Image: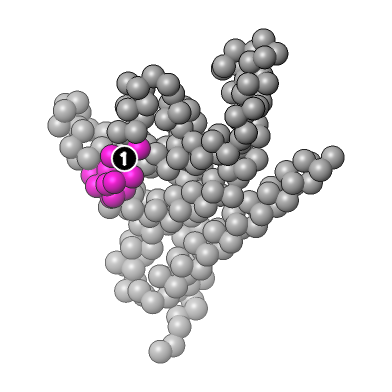
Amino acid sequence: MKLDFDLILQSFPLLLTGAGVTIEITVLSVTFGMLIGMFVGIARLSKNWAVKALAAIYVDCIRGTPLLVQIFIIYFALPLVLGQRIDPFLAAITACSVNSGAYVAEIFRAGIQSIDKGQMEAGRSLGMTWGQTMQYIILPQAFKRIIPPLGNEFIAMLKDSSLVSVIGFEELTRRGQLIIARTYGSFEIWLTVAFIYLVMTLTISRLVAYLERRYKIDDKH
């Protein structure tokens, strides 16, 4: 089988535009997911049983159901309750953020629990409140330890964002589908799409490795 390089070159700019949208979805989703995950992760460690139970229900429900189903619920089912259509971009970001938040919550919980309990006691003995100790002592140390799993979550979300193509949102995968529908160049286009995803994930992996080394070096000084 002979590759049609002309088709690849002609389609590459359009696919790169789709890749830019994929990165935008991923960055926004993981950013919001980190905010959600941090608070839910802390809530998972709360001594208040109701707060702890609600956080556990959220994490279990989201992690126990596929992202694709969550996208369908937000884009197709939620408008029936609200009585109005939801913008595909908003639906995509919401679904991916809520999904990411559940996984990030467990990352934060594990990171916080990895910090010696004496750190909290030391902060409280200095007159700091629980919240101040968590903000200024516990979380900065935990964050350094959770960089690798957060990087993995970013990569996972980058790939999973392709699922928003099912609601017609034109990210990288959807752009590939549209080009194939017009040109019938399935092999060339999917090969190019895979290559772009590979470049993006490898770049993120290298960045995460750099940040991990950077923080280790800083700890030694």
Q: Name the residue located 79 percent from the left edge and 46 percent from the top edge.
A: 217
Q: Is residue 24 left or right of 182 when viewed as pictured? A: right
Residue 191 seen from this side: yes
Expressed as whole percent of the image width and height from the top left, the position of residue 157 reads: 44, 50
Expressed as whole percent of the image width and height from the top left, the position of residue 125 reads: 67, 14
Expressed as whole percent of the image width and height from the top left, the position of residue 8 reads: 48, 72
Applied colour scheme? one colour
Residue 18 seen from this side: no
Expressed as whole percent of the image width and height from the top left, the position of residue 90 reads: 35, 35
SS type, badge 1: helix
Chief secondary structure of the magenta portion: helix
Give the magenta range: 59-72
Q: State which quarter of the image contains the C terminus.
A: top right
Amino acid, disc 1: Asp
Q: Is residue 193 left or right of 220 when viewed as pictured? A: left
The foreground one among 219 and 11 is: 219
Q: Name the residue located 40 percent from the left edge and 51 percent from the top edge.
A: 161
Q: What is the residue that sits farthest to the right in this orientation?
A: 221
Q: Quadrant of residue 87 in the image?
A: top left
Q: What is the residue that sits farthest to the top in this orientation?
A: 127
* Crowd rating for badge 1 (residues with CA inside 10 Å; few <14, some 14–19, many 20+): few
